Every structure is written in C-alpha cells, then in structure tokens.
C-alpha cells in the first residue's frame, strides 16, 4: 500500500450530502443509478453514477446521507458527466456498501 502524507490527504474533499434524486441508468456498462446529491450551500447539487444497485433500491436511497469526493474533475460515464465520487466499500461478491455518517451532520460537512 502506498502511503500519503497529511498534506496530500487534506486535498481530498470528502463531504456529506443528501441524495435528492435517484434514476435508473440503463446506459451504464455495469448496473448503476444516476443520483443527484445536495452537498450544501458551498458546493451545491452534484450528479454522479453510483454502482449500488445490488444492495439498495431507489426508495432506499432517496433522502439518505452519503459521503462523496467532490473535488475530482468531471468524468464522462456514457451520456452522464459525473461530478463526484460516491464512496463505498466492495464486498467479496462485488456489491457496494455505502460509506455513510452514523449521526446526522449538515450537508457539506467535511471529513477531517
């Protein structure tokens, strides 16, 4: 595992946001949803593709708090331009478990 220093870690903007919209993403090569997340007034609303269809329904995700990396450059994923990375953990079967705060914090809160 490559080590990083504190200054490198501080560059990663891991922020809390609330999922405000979830749609199917049939054009994705790997099953995914299109999600819109409110990251608070400083960052605003961002969209992304999330490969979380194995464990979560659209109804499960709506209004759920998640943790996202919001300072990656935009990335084209099929017809969608992804504006952040939804964070999660891969299980042995390939499904993804979302990384989420265990208590309520305001949208835009930074992991630090």
Image: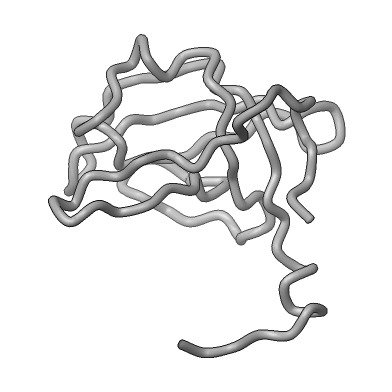
Residue 89 appears left or right of 45:
left
Residue at far bottom of view? 2
| Residue farthest left in this picture | 93
Q: Position of residue 53 (x, y in %)?
A: 24, 31
Q: Position of residue 28 (x, y in %)?
A: 23, 42
- Left or right of 43: which side holds 59? left
Q: Residue furthest top?
A: 59
Residue sticking out furthest to the right: 42
Residue drawn at the location 27% of the way across and 30% of the way down:
25
Residue ID at (31%, 47%)? 78
Task: Name the residue rendered at 29%, 25% in the picture.
Answer: 56
User: Which residue occupies the foreground of this view, 94 or 101?
Assistant: 101
Does residue 65 appear left or right of residue 51 in this picture? right
Q: Quadrant of residue 55?
A: top left
Along the line of sight, the residue nearer the viewer: 103 or 71: 103
How many marks overall? 0
Say if 109 sits above or below 105 in the image. Answer: below
Q: Quadrant of the C terminus?
A: bottom right
Residue visible at 57% across and 46% down in the picture: 83
Q: Is residue 71 left or right of residue 77?
A: right
Residue 43 placed where, x, y %? Answer: 78, 38
Could you say which quadrant of the image residue 71 lies in? bottom right
Q: How is the image coloured?
A: one colour
Q: Is the residue 37 above or below the residue 58 in the image?
A: below
């Amino acid at each position: 595992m490559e080590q990083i220093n504190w200054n490198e870690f501080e560059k990663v903007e891991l922020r809390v946001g609330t999922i405000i919209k979830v749609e199917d993403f049939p054009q994705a090569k790997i099953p995914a949803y299109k999600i819109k997340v409110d990251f608070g007034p400083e960052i605003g609303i961002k969209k992304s593709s999330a490969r979380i269809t194995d464990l979560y329904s659209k109804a499960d995700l709506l209004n759920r708090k998640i943790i996202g990396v919001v300072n990656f450059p935009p990335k084209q994923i099929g017809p969608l331009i992804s504006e952040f990375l939804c964070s999660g953990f891969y299980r042995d079967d390939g499904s993804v478990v979302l990384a989420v705060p265990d208590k309520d914090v305001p949208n835009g809160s930074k992991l630090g």
